[in-house]
Image: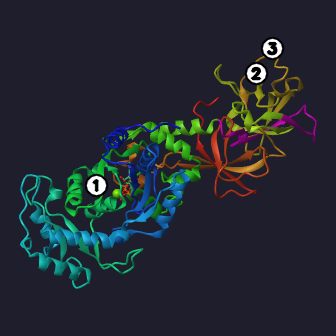
Amino acid sequence: MEEISNFIKTIMQKDLETGRVSEIVTRFPPEPNAYLHIGHARALVTNFELAKHFNGRTNLRFDDTNPAKEDVEFVEAIIKDIEWLGYKPDKILFGSDYFEESYQYAVKLIKKGLAYVCDLSQEEIREYRGTLTEPGRNSPYRNRSVEENLELFENMRNGVYKEGEKVLRAKIDMSHPNLNMRDPVIYRIMYVEHHRQGTKWCIFPMYDFAHPLQDAIEGITHSLCSLEYENHRILYDWFIEHCETPHVPQQIEFGRLNITNTIMSKRYLRQLVEKGLVEGYDDPRMPTLIGLRRRGYTPEAIKNFILATGLSRINSTVESDMLEHFLREDLKLKAKRLMAVIEPLKVIITNYPEDEVEYLDAVNNVENPELGTRKVAFSRNLYIDRNDFVLQKPNKHYKRLALGIEVRLFNAYFIKAYDVKYDSEGNIEAVLCTYDPETKSGSGFNARKPNGTIHFVEATTARPATFNLFEPLIYDSEVDKDNFIERLNPNSWIQKAGYIENAQERFEEPEKFQFIREGYFTVDKTSTDEQLVFNRIVPLKSSVK
Ligand code: ATP
Ligand code: MG
């Protein structure tokens, strides 16, 4: 596996050396309001790998302090995704479990004269805040006494007021150049049921207040977050300082990951699902970890991709080719190489005995003998891919079958086409060929050179299979326009009905294969023994065609 290497590792190394921290503790803090996608994997892998590198620990903490839109379904899915990637959180925690502690910290701020209950409406607060060029104005409620604030805040907790009637604000500086410091709201009233706390609470802490406290309570040493929190760091540090937490975590920002031709915004993904434009969050075209898993992506490929793309302080866009590269690298030696025909065309070997099937020796992966050998059936009736035959060889670069042309069949014989049969509609139904018994399994590879090598399956033993072939849901050039939904790629999921050699009795998830000349495939969740279904994970880079 790739080694983790980035600017955060350097900071951690130094903090250990200077004794600022004695161990590295990180956390991954998803909001349980969506499925994780490949962008989240950057934060996830980074947090877990950094801690692992320093023999530290990583908590999974559900950031569930915003009660309106969270769901247990997502909690379970996220736990499973992390496990699938091969990581084990030191603890699984919920931000909402700290509601009592953060309430007490808020009381502490009030007592220190650093927080007050404010009756301004949301709009008024915004209006009073000022702008980047103009200072804000103090709220008329800013100078309430500690006693009054304590009483009002307790009333807020006890459900005395309506939603929006009062908020608790930190008392910082209404003319601070950073707008986040202009007396930010830290508690608001909401009469909603929380997915873990039920109706116990009707006041909820804001993210900027809750997050640093959660980090401090858990003893997180380095709190990694994406770039959009950069100008919230000053507030993060202010809360840590004034709440006098026992631990002092450090917030460090990193750039978000974008991938070309890959939609990652939660909003877009939700639209795709809600409008029924994809099968669900596990649709094999989705960039969600469950989608990628169903498609056949491996944890190793994803992790190596994340580690290789590195981490910087700016957002970055990486070519989707790069992810595909790591997939091929990972699957190259792991996957058996079998033969499957995706668009079948019959081939009849007219000089081969009728009613006879022979079994030829084949190795499962020429680069990895550990994957063993198998027998490949051969008879008078075969299928080849429709794209591997034309009537007339068009030019010298064409390395497939044509009338009067000889090709080699993988693991089998040389065959030469001499005629075709048409169906009633005038389409080519079968290609008539002869074979040369002297060329078995490439043996007796005589002086004559075939016009390329193609794959095939024996027709009577082949198993019918559906092949799902994918392209991006949408190309980048089409995304940033209105109604991106109308611009979805109509070819993003094509199904083909073909055959696979009967190489093993059962084909089951999550086994991966290389289908020779067609790409890497895995078994889809809809596959049955009677009707096999395969997803193409990724095509082969260099097609033999
Ligand atoms: P939202 O802000 O809408 O909730 P989010 O993508 O930030 O969306 P979270 O559940 O908060 O969702 O994300 C968990 C962690 O994953 C956060 O630390 C976030 O910064 C990180 N993350 C999410 N998307 C990316 C991305 N594309 N690249 C890097 N990190 C990401
Ligand atoms: Mg977020």
Which mark is drawn over residue 447?
Answer: 3
10 Å crowding of disc 3: few (<14), some (14-19), many (20+): few
Question: Disc 2, disc 3: CB below 8 Å?
Answer: no
The quarter of the displayed image where residue 404 is located: top right
Q: Is residue 290 visible?
A: no
Whether pointer 1 and pointer 2 mark residues with C-beta atoms closer than 8 Å, the reply is: no
Residue type at tag 3: Ala
| Residue under numbered circle 1 | 248
How far apart in space, not on screen, are marks 2 and 3 (Cα)? 10 Å
**Left or right: residue 28 compared with residue 291:** left
Q: Position of residue 23 (x, y in %)?
A: 39, 49
Compare marks 1 and 2 and give the one earlier in the sequence: 1
Locate residue 329, reporting x and y percent.
58, 35
Image quadrant where residue 171 sits: bottom left
Labels 3, 1: front one: 1
Can you tell which of label 1 and label 2 is closer to the viewer?
1
Amino acid at the residue labelled 2: Pro
Give the residue number, with chain letter if any, for mark 2: 450
Name the quadrant containing residue 513.
top right
Question: Where's residue 30, x and y in %?
Answer: 40, 59
Gap between marks 1 and 2 measured at Cα:
71 Å
Near mark 2 (Cα within 10 A), the count class, few <14, some 14-19 or many ≥20, is: some
List x then y, in percent, for residue 413.
82, 28
Picture residue at 80% right of the left edge, 14% below the top = 447
Q: Which mark is residue 107?
A: none
